[in-house]
Amino acid sequence: MDDVKMKIESLSLSYSRGAPLALKDVSMGITANSVTAFIGPSGCGKSTFLRCLNRMNDFVRDVYIKGMVMLDGMDIYSPDVDVTNLRRRVGMVFQRPNPFPFSIRDNIAYGPKLLGERNRSKIEEIVERSLISAGLWEEVRDRLGEMATSLSGGQQQRLCIARAIAVEPEVLLMDEPTSALDPIATARVEELVRELKKDYTVAIVTHNMQQAARISDTTAFFLMGELVEYGPADVIFTTPGDKRTEDYITGRFG
Amino acid sequence: MLWGCMALSTAVLGLILAFLIYRGADAISWEFISEHPRAGMTEGGIITPIVGTVQLILVSMTFAFPVGVITAVYFNEYSHGGALTKTLRLAVRSLASIPSVVLGLFGFAFFCVFLSFGASLLSAGLTLGCLALPTLVTASETALQNVPQEFRDASYALGATRWQTIYKVVLPSAFPGIITGGILCIGRVAGETAPIMFTGAVFFAPGFARNIFDSVMALPYHIYVLATAGTQIDKTGPLQYGTILVLLTLVLGISMIGIVARARLRRRI
């Protein structure tokens, strides 16, 4: 249980040289097969931090990153790391559901096909397994050929989760996955996240403290680019060690 | 005032169409669109220029479509908007404002003479391709810009390379827009006279172009010839209006397909 899947050491980031740091010297560990939530007010750096974990910030021009991010002891920013392979191991689900304008089946099959899977029955098997894991199979089993965009927002987000786990990642990063969903769809995704930690290590960004309290094992509080504190969720939400954390979770700001 | 201007614009189109139908309708017959011209073009049909125009469209699009789309992909997906890209983009935009007769002379000098393609389907098609390029690049760029960034993010997050993302996600998503741009370009290409009159369209050809180095007859140039070179105006006149009607139907038809396709594909996404 206390197996550290990802270890972050003194990570700093700025969006251009000389600009103020968006992340300041962040160090923490992400435990395997658990849910780690990053909370904090808007612009505190929690999403930026999440996007460092699968190097999605690489696309930002002039981004400047210092420090180390280790996945199973391997520095993911080392020059000999294959970024595409890293992103297969560390999958991501985004804030707004973003299914491709393809059929439901082709959305799930996209990742496995990138990995070179050509066998049709194997692909069907992956599609079914992924949709079952994402709790969407019963709703869409008879219409896999339909456009993914015909699904409701909540279904689309679960489809995106299914698409992410179709490549069997080890870590699943989720960037405010429920912020565009209604409460019922949110509840389903939360339930799913609790299920997913059996097989995956989950790191989730949320602006919703109740959500973090409900689903996370470990909670990390960010403020203005700094990791103020992190620890077991029940400790953070009942007896936080830092005054700023307490102010935030009691609703004094944010 | 608004109504007046709108009515005037519509009336101009209506008048032209009415005039052409009035003068040309009698010339239209199955014989007219299925036979070669005869007797110094005072008799017979216009199948030779119809086929020639279709051949020109095919050659020009075979060249311009891939080049235009790839250029747009470079501008929109690869470049970082540096000085070089800005200059190149400006150059492509400027290409659109070159008068077509200048383009025709360029085509003659470059394709016919310098590259020794002669006055041929190939030279004329390539010249028309140059005419279509800026429109195609702009249309494709717009289509690529309309692909949400979220699609690219999702693809990268699944471990796709930049090329896989472009090839498997971005291009398929942008395809409706790109195709529509292409169809509208075809309409433009089909109607141009100036770029082809020096480069490959001929006054008269005994039959269809059999290969890309043959010269061709084309509808717009055929109209020009009928209108300026005939001595028996009583006989060529009706043929001329008939040809105009056919060309106009072709161009408007292609544009309509483009517009309808755009509307339908928009609804689907």
Image (cartoon, rainbow, N blue to C red):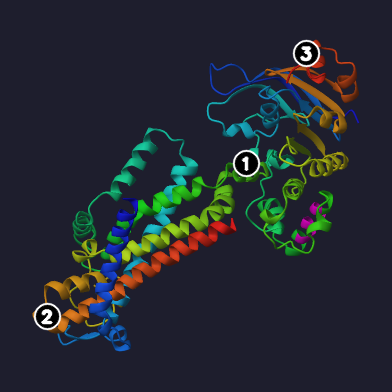
Q: Crowding at label 2, few (<14), some or many (≥20) Cα neighbours within 10 Å?
A: some
What residue do we see at 58% from left, 48% from top? B165
Give the residue at mark 3. Answer: A244
Mark 3 and mark 1: span between their CA atoms?
33 Å
Q: Which amino acid does label 1 sit on?
A: Asp
What is the span of residues highlighted in magenta in the rendered image? A124-131
Q: In this view, does B236 lie to the left or right of A32?
A: left
Could you tell me if the residues under marks 3 and 2 are in contact, i.e. CB atoms within 8 Å?
Answer: no
Give the residue at mark 1. Answer: B153
- Quarter of image, res A140: bottom right
Whether residue B199 is situated above or below residue B37 in the rendered picture: above
SS of the residue under disc 2? helix
x then y, percent, for residue B257: 44, 67
x then y, percent, for residue A131: 80, 53
Quadrant (top left/top right/bottom left/bottom right) for the N terminus of chain A: top right
What residue do we see at 30% from left, 58% from top? B9
Q: Which is more N-terminal, label 1 or label 2?
A: 1
Whether residue B205 is visible here, answered yes or no, is no
Residue furthest to the left: B231
